[in-house]
Amino acid sequence: MVSDALTRMLILQDRDMKLQQVEADLVSIPKERRACEARIATLQAEIEASRQRIKELETKGRSIETEMASVEEQVVKYKNQQILVKKNEEYQALTHEIAAASEKISELESSELEVLYELDEARKVQKVAEEEIAARIERERADLGKLDEREQRVSGELAGAKEAFAKAEAALDKPTLSKYRQVARGLKFPVIVALSDQKCSGCHMRVSNAIDSEVRAASEITTCDNCGRILYSEA
Ligand SMILES: [Zn+2]
């Protein structure tokens, strides 16, 4: 049996839970949004880093080519000089320079090949990674959209929830209301629970016989001797 006062308390509990849920949502939604935005920023930074890596390789490749062109130019100069020199030592010195330059060119060629290979690999990896990251960003953006919708909906519910809560509070007499507040302050919802088979359905502990009969009588507000929740009889 549930007394009138208990019925009103149960209604208050329901409105209280609803209001707290709305308020908790209004606190958590902006946090969820920031977390979502941070994840998007991280993903974008990942894309940027991999693009940067490719740019660096491209720059490296270009600088190798530039260096190679200048060494090749040098070789042409040496060869032209060789035609003009008279002394054998000078001719030999230039031959030596040309050999050194040719060596340098082949070194540069192999560096360039390495860079081109790396670039090729990096581009392949980047293509796959960018597609995957873009899909993840899209999912995060969709979540952001849902958060916006949820926030709008919940904001719209706040005034109504406050009003319903105030109404439910007003329906209780002072002692009952202060009892409810006292119990609700320190406990997790639900704070008004059924007693079935002499067990509190809040903490699942067995209550004393005295409490059991008090709850059955339903003439006053009785709390669980273990957890302190307000009890009502389901029978
Ligand atoms: Zn209990």
Image: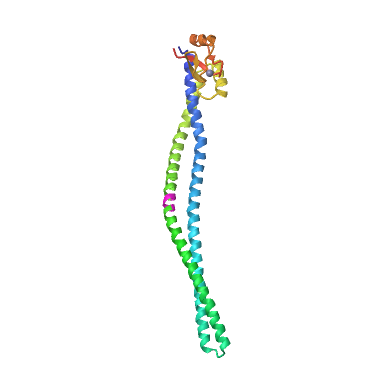
In front: 52, or 69? 69
Judge whether residue 110 can be spotted in this image: yes
In front: 109, or 173? 109
Up the image or down, 120 lies above or below 220; here it is below
Up the image or down, 89 lies above or below 126; here it is below
**Horizontal and vertical percent for residue 199?**
50, 15
In front: 98, or 46? 98
Magenta span: helix, strand or loop, mainly?
helix
Up the image or down, 88 lies above or below 18; here it is below
Q: How many marks?
A: 0
Up the image or down, 178 lies above or below 154; here it is above
Judge whether residue 219 can be spotted in this image: no
| Range covered by the magenta-colored residues | 129-133
Residue at 51% of width from left, 76% of height from top?
102
**Horizontal and vertical percent for residue 74?**
52, 79
The quarter in which the C terminus is drawn is top left
**Horizontal and vertical percent for residue 95?**
53, 82
Residue at the far bottom: name it. Answer: 86
Residue 38 on the magenta span? no
Colour convention: rainbow
Residue at 48% of width from left, 10% of height from top?
216
Left or right for 185, reference 1: right
**Horizontal and vertical percent for residue 197?**
47, 13
The quarter in which the N terminus is drawn is top left
